[in-house]
Image (tube, helix red, strand yellow):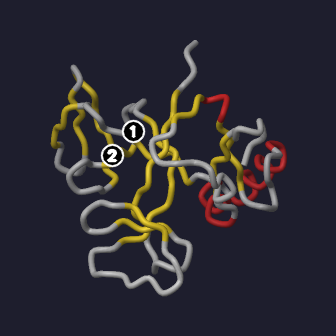
């Protein structure tokens, strides 16, 4: 079985741009906020996300024109039907957002690739990396409540061999 390959990409997120945050200008350039940076109307806060091109029915993909997440309804001969009014788009360059890259992975740049074995899902501070505890909390709270209270980040294997 072939390992899945993931890549990193800056994607817009809600919120005000603060010192040290990354943001995208209206021309598409990525910058890191420094103290005293003047922001313009088109500037948007971004975070680094783990993404995949392995798209399946039911996944939410990032629409290339609008940047919105839309649900995949079907995939037929390389064409993807999506959204509330079944529209079609060719499956070329499309991707889905997996989750946010851990802020501890400071060396990670946009476009880096990671294999499945180089990625770990981490659930919040309280239940970090303990599947048994994660399952207990999920059974008690339900997965939606768990995700709300213990945000997931994806740690990637660094040059040192550890996950950050």
Identify the image quadrant of residue 137.
bottom right
Q: Is residue 108 left or right of residue 87?
A: right
Look at the image and tell me in which quarter the N terminus lies: top right
Residue toward you, 107 or 18: 107
Image coordinates for residue 38, horizontal then vertical, percent: 38, 85
Task: Classify mark 1: residues with Cα within 10 Å, few (<14), some (14-19) or many (20+).
Answer: few
Q: Is residue 150 above or below residue 122?
A: below
* Callout 1–callout 2 Cβ contact below 8 Å: yes
Task: Classify mark 2: residues with Cα within 10 Å, few (<14), some (14-19) or many (20+).
Answer: many
Q: Please tell me which of labels 1 and 2 falls first in the chain.
A: 1
> Could you say which disc has been placed on residue 90 in the image?
none
> Could you say which disc has been placed on residue 58 in the image?
1
For label 2, the residue is 71
Q: CA distance from mark 1 to mark 2?
A: 6 Å
SS at mark 2 in the image: strand
| Residue at left offset 46%, top offset 80% | 16
Q: Is residue 129 above or below residue 33?
A: above
Residue toward you, 162 or 4: 162
SS at mark 1 in the image: loop
| Residue at left offset 52%, top offset 34% | 113
Identify the image quadrant of residue 147.
bottom right
């Amino acid at each position: 079985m072939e390992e899945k390959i993931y890549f990193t990409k800056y994607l817009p997120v809600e919120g005000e741009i603060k010192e040290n945050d990354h943001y995208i200008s209206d021309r598409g350039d990525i910058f890191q906020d420094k103290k005293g940076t003047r922001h313009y109307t088109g500037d948007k806060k971004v975070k680094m996300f783990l993404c995949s091109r392995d798209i399946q029915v039911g996944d939410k993909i990032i629409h290339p024109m609008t940047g919105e997440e839309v649900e995949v309804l079907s995939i037929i001969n390389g064409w993807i039907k999506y959204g509330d009014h079944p529209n079609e788009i060719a499956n070329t360059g499309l991707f889905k957002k997996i989750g946010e890259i851990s802020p501890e992975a400071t060396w990670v740049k946009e476009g880096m690739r990671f294999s499945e074995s180089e990625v770990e899902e981490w659930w919040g501070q309280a239940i970090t990396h303990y599947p048994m505890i994660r399952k207990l909390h999920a059974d008690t709270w339900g997965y939606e409540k768990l995700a709300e209270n213990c945000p997931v980040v994806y740690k990637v294997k660094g040059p040192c061999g550890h996950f950050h």
